[in-house]
Structures are given as structure tokens and as C-alpha cells.
Amino acid sequence: MDPTFNVDPFAAGIPWYDENGQFSPQFSSGLGFNYNLQAVTVPVVPQVAEVEHRVLSQDALVQTFYEGPKKYNDRNTDIINWVEKEPKQVPEVVKDRYDQAAIHIYKKKDRTAEKTFGGVTAMKVDFIQIQSLLIIDAIEPILADVGLRPADKSKVRINRPFKELYFAYPSISALAQRQHPHTDLENHLNVLLKVMDELLSEMSQAIFTLQTKKQISFEYLWTIFPKDIIVYSRVDGQDRLYQVVENTLYSCSVACQYVRFDGTIFGMARTTLHIGYFPGARSISDLSVYPVGFHPDLNLERRLAERGRQVLDFQDICYREYSGVGKAEWYSDEDEDLDELKTAKYYVTGRIIIDAFGFGKFNPDHSITVTAIKPEEGDEPHGTARHRSNPNDDSEKRRPSPEEQQSNRNEIQAIRKHLLLMSPMLAGYSLKLKKWLWLSIDKVRPLSWNEDAYDHLVFPADHKSLLLSFVKNHKQSSKQIDDVIAGKGQGLIVLLSGPPGTGKTLTAEAVADKARRPLQYLHAEDLGTQASSIGKNLTKVFDLASEWNSMILLDEADAFLTKRSTGDDNRDETVSAVFHHLEYFRGIIFLTTNLLSKIDQAFLSRCHIHLRYPPLSIQSRSVLWKNFLSRVQTPPSRSLQHDQAPSGQPSRSEADRVTVNLSADGINLLAAWNLNGREIKNVVKTAHLWCCYNNSELTLASIEAAISVTAPFADKTVMEGDVSTSSKRPRLS
């Protein structure tokens, strides 16, 4: 073979081995050639002069160096002083004698000590090594219980500050007392206890002195967090209890667990609580985390147990109201090597849906994970994880049946500790914010259905009755009359068209409350502008509606229903995507529009109900004036959104109510103003606030003054026989 020269010339002369690890002398012969053994190229021999120069400068021998005593200038550094002389080794006969000892104690120089005797640095115990197999076998389960599981069970090393021995002392002492006198095991355990007394006596005395004052220092902070102890912390403004899972404190952090619901079962979830460094001694109850026994509130556990029982009521889909802070969580993928959990807080008002199972189903990247609850000592193995063979396998998750929910309840309530450890955070969805959030159970309220809204609809009674009957009987009727294509045309599409402020949105809200079904609000910005994103977002919304049996309101749907043309391909694709999803949607959707003339004819043919809202007549406006003015003196029922239509009126205390001094003729005069329903509501609200400020009655003059600033371009219909035909408006002063 031809020599190869494009290799490192200094690699020549090195012994080579074949693929079986056998020495191959031909590789060290100094010849340069290619040898095709697993595509290995053998380097070429360098020039003879270079080899002779390198060989003459070295001897063919091996030299070993040993770590020696540090030099004076290197005592405070990590620099190693390498020496040729081997340190004196312990003779084998002495090693055998060492191995006969049950416990080895290793001391090192205490360079932090201030006092020395005769210039000699004091010594302190660095670690101990238990060698007695009798001791190791006897205390192995005790050490495991405090978190020490040595890989080498023939020798157990315990380092300073001997945390495992500190927590295990009561159990080891009790074990020694149970032994028969004068047995080998008793003797060995007593030796261990004697060593422990010497190691821990000074520290135990210091800890005892601190705890008699209900104080602790940062140095001994770990001593108040033994494994399994229940600790208190205030998290996100709420009182919480956790159970410590490790008996050591690392980086000012305490590893804990608590109980929460994952949508199917109740199980244990882990978290880490942090304690900042502090100098000197501090009151234990002033720490951010501390054992619950130091909490001053004697009713704390009773309150948290009751709160835990309330959480058991939210195992299914629950429709509620909420007013408070909610927290969103998601993982950031900005850093390719680290997925960081991000959080954001939102102030949530209005209606919510509590749904832990849906939270995991529709947030696959951030599902709720738990581990099975271990049975208490002496209890029969159970745990609500019986519904799944593997609690961490999301594929086995499902909504629990009513029987399984009751079983979950019984098992959690059987052990009071589980109620205390129950997380007060519920996984839910804000219908107003359209976000999945963690919501506090303390801020959840029962739902108040707005029964009055349906009765106050200014619409023909037969139309209202027809619409309500369709909504209530939708599922049954859709099964009886199906499309030629299976799964197609089973939804209920309702189009509401008419000028602004005529009651279109109110109709959908009122019917949803009358039917006692959730209503999902949807706007154009929620769906996007491209056909692909619109289809994806519609699928998400329709899936949620199917999951919750809710209705959908797509307000101002003109952008998605406009007539298609040959000049705008993107718009045509958007309209087609909406049509396709509507055809296969099995739920109920209301769509509103102010531009009926621009709606695509293909969509109109897909509507099951089309209600047209003409401009309000004088009679309709008169009814609206009466309805809104009556709400000034009588607080309205809670609407679907506290700060939105249909009511539009904030809840009022007695001090906010005003007297309405308005006759029937005054109502007729107000009805003459060409205002829509939304404008009438805003006028009443403005006039009411003005009268509250001036502590005056609500009169015709004050209301017309409010019209001048709320709807300055409104005109007035002149009716025959009207006392006042002037269209001039008084001004607010």
C-alpha cells in the first residue's frame, strides 16, 4: 500500500492494538502505511533525526508522584504539592485491627476555631463511619426513613453536621431499649448512642435554648424540618399547609408535598418553599415557612380542613362566578436547554368554569400531574389512584363517574391530614378573559342566573318562545332529524341581524341564562385573520362548547360572513373555513351582524333561525326606559358579566339608590328620543351617577340633560299632541 503523509508525524512508533484488544507488533515497527482495519489509517514514521532528538531527551521509565504536605505559601489554596516519596502506609496487620472497630471517628483540624492549646489547632469531627454489620442491619430502616440510603451497606458514612443521626436519635434509642440485655446488638447500639451523645450534645443544647424562646438560627434551621412534618406557609395570599418530604434543607429551600386533584384522582404533588438567609436568631413564626405547631391561630386547622372539604365538591364541571386574582402558568421555550415555568396574574371577574379534567385535556403541555397517596401506617392500601393503574399516565385519565367522585370524597375525608394538605387552587377557565387559570376557592361564588333578562327582552313573545324551545330541545331534535352526511348539520345556528343597540347580544345572553347554560363570548380578534388560524381556533372553541354543553356567541360576525368574490382569495378562504366548521358543529351558536346586506347567501341558507331586529319603536323605547329606571331603585340580578350588558348596572348599596320622580307622561317624552337600547342604558347610568353626586332626585330634566352629553346627536320624534315639540336639550351644569 502507498504511504500516507497527511497524518500527525509525531504519532509514529506508538504501539497499536487490533480490534480484539491484542497487541499488534507490526504497528510499532516504524513503517508508515495504510492498514484498512475498520478504516484506521496508520500514521507515517517521522524523519529519523526528529525521532532521535525526542528519544534522547527521555528515559524509558514510569515515575509516580504523591500528594505531600502543603507548602507554607499554599496553605490557603487548592494547589497540591506533589512529591516523589510515598507517604508511610498503614501495615496490613494494623488495617485488620482497624476493621474490628464498630465505629470510626474521623477528625480534622478546625481552622475556624479561635482558641488553641500550645499553638496546636483544635480538632473537630468531620465524619463517622459505621462498620458494625449488626448496627447497620438494625438501623437501616431507620436511616432510610430519614433519607439516608447508602450504596455500600457494609460501611455507612455520616458527615457533619450529622443531620441523619439527629433525626434518627429517638428511634435508635427506642430500638436499643427493646433489646435483650447483654446481647451483642445491645452493646453495639449503646456504643453508637454514646458516640451520638458526644456528637450532638452541644448542638442539641443550643437548639433547646433557642426553641424554648420559640426562636431558631439559620445554622440550625434544618432541625425544625424533619421528614413528614406539617409546615405552614402563606402562598399567593392564602394559608397553606404542606408535608416535608426530605429532612434536609438545601439552598434555603424545603421540599414539600400537598394534595390536589388532577381531573380524575386526588394525589400528591411536589413543590419547593424558600427561606431567605437571616443573621442571628429569629422567631420561628416570623419565617416564611415553619412547622404548623408554632402558628398562633388555634382555628387554623379547622378552617383549612373545611376548605379541603369544599374542594371535594369541584370534581366535575362546575359553572360559578368569581371575583379575585387568577394565576396563569406556562413553560417558556426561549432557552433551548431549559424550559422555565412562567407565571402571570390576572384580575378575574364574572363567570368561570371549574374543570380540572378539561384543564389537562386542553393544556397538554401543562397538565396536572400527581402521584398516588401512600396509605398511612396501619391503614389498608387505597388512595384515589385506584382509578388508574399509573397515576402519571395521562392516557388513563378520564372524568370520574358520580360513584368514583363519592369514593374520592370518602377516602380523602377518612384521613384529616389530607384535607389539611388540600390545595385551595382550582383549575378553571375565565369566560371573560378566555384563559385557563388557577383560581382560589375562597373567591368562588355560587352562580346567580339572570332570570329577569329574558322577561325584559323587547321582542315578540312568540319569537322568544320559539327560540327558547329550540335551545332547550336541541340535542333531542338533532338526533331525530339528521343530514344526509353523518355528523353534518346537527348544530343550531342562530343569526341575529339589525341595527346596533336593538337587543341582539342581550337575546343570546338572556336565552343562555334562561336555559341555564354557559355562554362563550367570541370576537373576531379571538379567531385571527388567516384561514388556517381561524380553523384551528374555531376547533378549540367548538371542542370546549361540546365539553361543557355551552352556547357560543360570535359577536359582530360580519368579517367572517361577507359575500365571497374573485378579488380577495384570503377572505374567500376565511369565509369557506368558517362555513365548513359551522356545518360540522353540533352545538348552539349565535351570530350577530349589523350588515345583513353584505352576508354571503351560502351562510344564510345554513342558518336554522334568523331573527331580524328593526329599529326600536317608540313603544319599545318606552318599555326600555321603564326597565332601566326600575333598576335604579331596585338592585338588578347579577348579569352574565358584572361590568357588561345585559344589565350594565353595577351593584348598588342603599346609599347609591336615588328616588325616581318621573310620571308616565315623562316616560313618553323620553321615548320620543331616537335612542337605541345601549344609549338608553348609558343615559340612565350617567343621570343616576350625577344625581347620586348631587344628592337629588332623578327627574325628566336631569335625564334629558344626561342625553345631551351621552348622545349629543340624537334627535326627537315629534308626536301629535306632544306637549313639548322642541328638540333642544338642557345642559348639565
Image: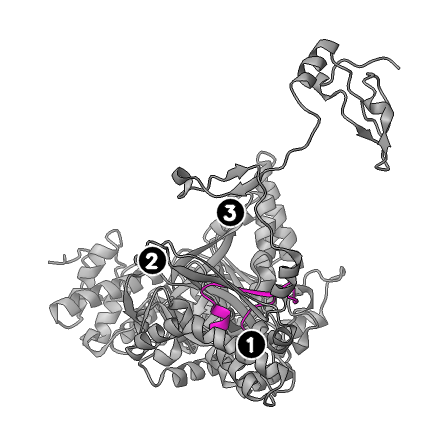
- The answer to whether any part of residue 641 appears in the image is no
Tag 2–tag 3 contact (CB < 8 Å): no
User: In this picture, is 54 found above or below 345?
Assistant: above
Q: Amino acid at mark 1?
A: Gln
Asked which secondary structure carries label 1, the reply is loop
Of the residues tagged 3 and 1, which is closer to the observer? 1
| In-front residue for pair 417/289 | 289
Q: According to the image, label 2 marks what residue?
A: 113
User: In this picture, is 325 found above or below 177?
Assistant: above
Dominant SS in magenta: loop
Q: Residues within 10 Å of mark 3 (few under 14, many from 20)?
A: some
Q: According to the image, label 1 marks what residue?
A: 315
- The answer to whether any part of residue 561 appears in the image is yes
Q: Which mark is residue 559?
A: 3
Picture coordinates of residue 461, whole percent (x, y): 47, 74
Looking at the rendering, which quadrant does residue 41 occupy?
A: top right
Q: Which mark is residue 229?
A: none
Picture coordinates of residue 660, whole percent (x, y): 20, 75
Asked which secondary structure carries label 2, the reply is loop
Of the residues tagged 2 and 1, which is closer to the observer? 2
Instruction: Give the mark nearest the N terminus, 2 or 3.
Output: 2
Tag 2–tag 1 contact (CB < 8 Å): no
Looking at the rendering, the stretch of residues picked out in magenta corresponds to: 146-166
Quadrant the N terminus occupies: top right
Q: Amino acid at mark 2?
A: Ala
